[in-house]
Image (cartoon, grey):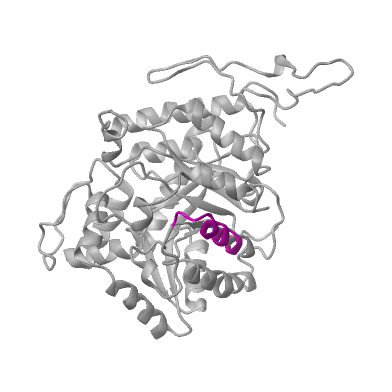
Amino acid sequence: MARRQMHLGVFVLGTGNHIAGWRMPGAYDSFVDLKVIQHIARIAERGCFDLLFLGDGLAVKENDHPSFTSRFEPITMLGALAATTTHLGLGATASTTYNEPFNVARQFASLDHLTSGRAAWNAVTSSGGLAALNFGREHPPHAERYRVAEEFVDVVTGLWDCWEDGAVVANRETGQYLDFSKIHSLDHDGTYFRVKGPNNAPRSPQGRPIILQAGASEPGLDLAARTADVVFAVVQDLEEARVGYTALKSRMPRFGRRPEEIAVLPGVMPVIGATRQEARDTLDKLQSFVTGSNAAGLLSGRLGMDVSGFPLDELVPDLPLPDTSHGFARAMLSKARREGMTWRDLHNLTGAARGHWVIAGTPSDIADTLQEWFETGAADGFNILPAWFPGAFDQFVDEVVPELQRRGLFRREYTATTLRGHLGLDLPPSRFGAPR
């Protein structure tokens, strides 16, 4: 039996995942340059990564992360990458709160065809209320956002299923182009959406594009257990990560799914040095760039409240989970309670990796930690968040990936051509036709 291997994704923010990573020598300081994302994609393919992932946001606010306030629309950017990558999965966020299912289904089906089966959709509910002001709407409360998301995902997957395999005949002798017995209307009439269908793109190379999710609330976990192929987890502690991993996997049989049908990838920012002291010095340099203003905006968003008025050296009190992002808030507040953190500590934590896990050490140290999490039921792989691009990502690919490969934990070359193949997932059948 083949040894289980890690899956690796890279979360791309062109100026770096650290809020001030762009200040490091040689770092990119712009995310609105096609050459930047193309270079990052080349590094990822050199490292045999499963997936390159682009998040998205629908509003601009002062003191936010630089790459949140200035970036291209992600589907457009991935469309450009389709022509300059060959194996790398390409994933992006599209909100279920501020989009229409037909448009999302069409966009990602098109991307899956353009990439010959490497597209992934991150289905998110848009936690930030500022986006509502750009769409002339009231921002729905958390519970309703997830009710909308449940129906939205069902409509999108239904539209992807409307075409069976073999619907395109293109018979030059008979003149038949399509077999309409294999093209179906969806005829969805639900609480939030009415969509006739079918989608106007044939069945995609993966059957359906891969679905990514990151919800950590109860409805978010149910949605992931029922529909996701990959889950991006927010973690700060090994034992909590194990508990969360088990909790998600144990939900899947309720929806007729096996635990191995989801890959759980915690987000992690590795800071690497030739020695442990060098890694700590690099992290200290990054953290010296964090200020009260540039971290407070991010932290306020994560906790769903204005934190600018709290004294920095006061202990973080017990706070309720916000109506925004449960995953980030739960992980950060749990760490604050566990370690007796002050607001200053929480500012620094948020500025470093936006609430994600940070580890610093030598390449062997980093590999040891990832191996422990992978082999003890906390992860199926990792979503790597380089502090800056391209240097920190080059370092991970050139120094940590070979260490993982030597240990037999990660592929040395691509053995599949689709993202679904990289993840070891079967092609899903169309709900309207026979399995492939």
Whether residue 168 is situated above or below residue 55 in the rendered picture: above
| Residue 41 drawn in magenta | yes
Task: Count numbered badges in the picture.
Answer: 0
Image spot of residue 87 (x, y percent):
66, 53
Residue in the picture at 25% in, 56% down:
63
Whether residue 321 is situated above or below residue 242 in the rendered picture: above
Please identify the dominant SS of the magenta region: helix
Image spot of residue 183 (x, y percent):
67, 18
**Start and end of the magenta stretch?**
31-43
Looking at the picture, tell me which residue is in the foreground, 114 or 141.
Answer: 114
| Residue 54 drawn in magenta | no
Residue in the picture at 23% in, 63% down:
347
> Residue 332 falls in which quadrant of the image?
bottom left
Using residue 213 as the reference point, say whether residue 316 is left or right of it: left
Image spot of residue 182 (x, y percent):
70, 18
Using residue 297 as the reference point, say whether residue 409 is left or right of it: right
Query: Is residue 340 among the parts visible in the rendering?
Result: no
> Residue 193 falls in which quadrant of the image?
top left
Query: Is residue 60 among the parts visible in the rendering?
Result: yes
